[in-house]
Image (cartoon, grey):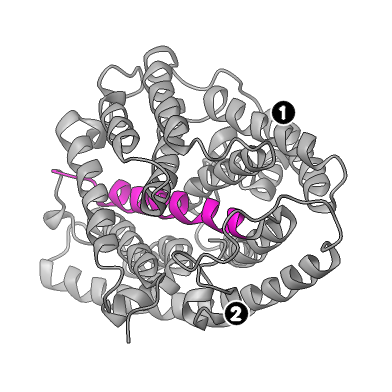
Amino acid sequence: MSAPRLAWLDALRGIGALAVVVEHILPWYLPSLRFYWFNPGVYGILVFFLVSGYIIPASLERHGDVRAFWISRFFRLYPLYLAVIALVLALAWWVPVREAVPRDGSAVAAHATMLLDVVSVGGVADTMWTLSYEMVFYLVVTALFLTRGHQRSGTLAMAFAGGAVVVGLLAPGAVLGGSWTAYASCAVFVVGLTCVVGGKFRTAAAVVLGLMAVTLLVLSSRVPWLGVAVLAVMFAGTAIYRWERGDAGLWPVAVTAALVGITPVWAVMSGWWWVQTGVWLTTIALAGATFAGTMALRGRRLPKVAVWLGLISYSLYLVHHPVLKYVVEVTGDLRARELPYQLAVTAVALVAVVALSALAYRYVEKPMQALGRRVSRQSRLQSAGEARVVPEHPGDDRVLGHEEGQVPDRVRDNVGD
């Protein structure tokens, strides 16, 4: 029996999540073992972004239902996200919330939209910054889908990659500053998505949301060139999906990779070790090779542990950073301790992180995803008579299975992810 068609995407998520965990463990727990020839954290999130770029448009195109798509996104992302926020705030008396989080309503507004990094607001959990770019991608793809511009994935990837180079040359930081960006974007986000989900002025609202997302990306991000480069990487993932279907070539992906690779070379904001030319290029090359290698194995059985880690990867990604901080709070600063002691504490911390992530997946993510699927199905039935975009590949089983109901449970969680 062949491996489920989407198991390789789960395996990629597992690899990406573990890489991010390694990036945060090394400086706190095992500083003597830290390496600097590539950045495992950036490598991990690039893998995540390629996966999202590959699967999100595939899901939207399959069903042609943006209402169901956003319902699925809400139940997939927000329950665990809110649970982690609640945990961090509940334990703030012990481990204070990061200083990067404003102590006013702008933090609430930015967390409500997940557009944290693109309005220059720190997340209560450090890793939440990447969710900003996932949300920007969802908004842009929805607008493109409703205006029939989504098929130009390769062109979009190259355009964003070229834009990253230009923004890197010109932008020393956020042009739009202040808490008003968080409040304004939250208001537009809530009203716009209400229209998109409700159906009234859907296309106009989606276009406004997409334009807002790109504007914030360029003018209000913490590191503007990085945000634009991330969108290029995600659209490169979509271009790979188009290539797999036989609808386009791979050359736009190569051009995008080259442009993203040179983006930080002349960028104004480029003083970090991980964007030095050799490190940056190595990190990008490894992320691309990991995606390509795992994709090449998509018809084979993959290690169960890798697939399982992929299933709990969202929990692993959001839970691990607070847990690592809490362990250090108990043990004290580990950086000057003996290596055997550091290794022992690291092993305990990893067990705790994986166990708590598995519990979060089992009791928060999985039930909410199941509820989201039920609500999505009801939404499709209710909107069956509405005018909507016709699914482009309704019977195609090359990516998502012939019918969603035939996809195995452990893989079905990826539909729309």
Q: Is residue 201 above or below residue 417?
A: above
Residue that lies at the very extreme toward the bottom in this rendered image: 1
- Where residue 366 sits: x, y (%)? 58, 78
Q: CA distance from mark 1 to mark 2?
A: 44 Å
Q: Is residue 365 above or below residue 325?
A: below
40 part of magenta stretch: yes
Outermost top residue = 170
The x and y percentages for residue 318 are 48, 62
Residue type at numbered disc 2 = Gly
The answer to which of 409 and 222 lies nearer the viewer is: 409
Compared with 213, 368 (above or below) is below
* Disc 2 target residue: 405
Q: Is residue 372 magenta?
A: no
Answer with left or right where residue 290 lies relative to residue 87: left
Disc nearer the start of the sequence (1/2): 1
Q: Secondary structure under badge 2?
A: helix
Question: Magenta region: which residues?
Answer: 37-62
- Residue beneath the point at 66% across and 66% down: 75
From the top left corner, tell me how far across and down residue 196 is, in percent: 78, 47
Residue 345 picture location, percent across and down: 25, 73
The quadrant in which the N terminus is found is: bottom left
Pick the front one: 96 or 367: 367
User: Magenta segment, principal secondary structure?
Assistant: helix
Q: Which residue is mark 1?
A: 180
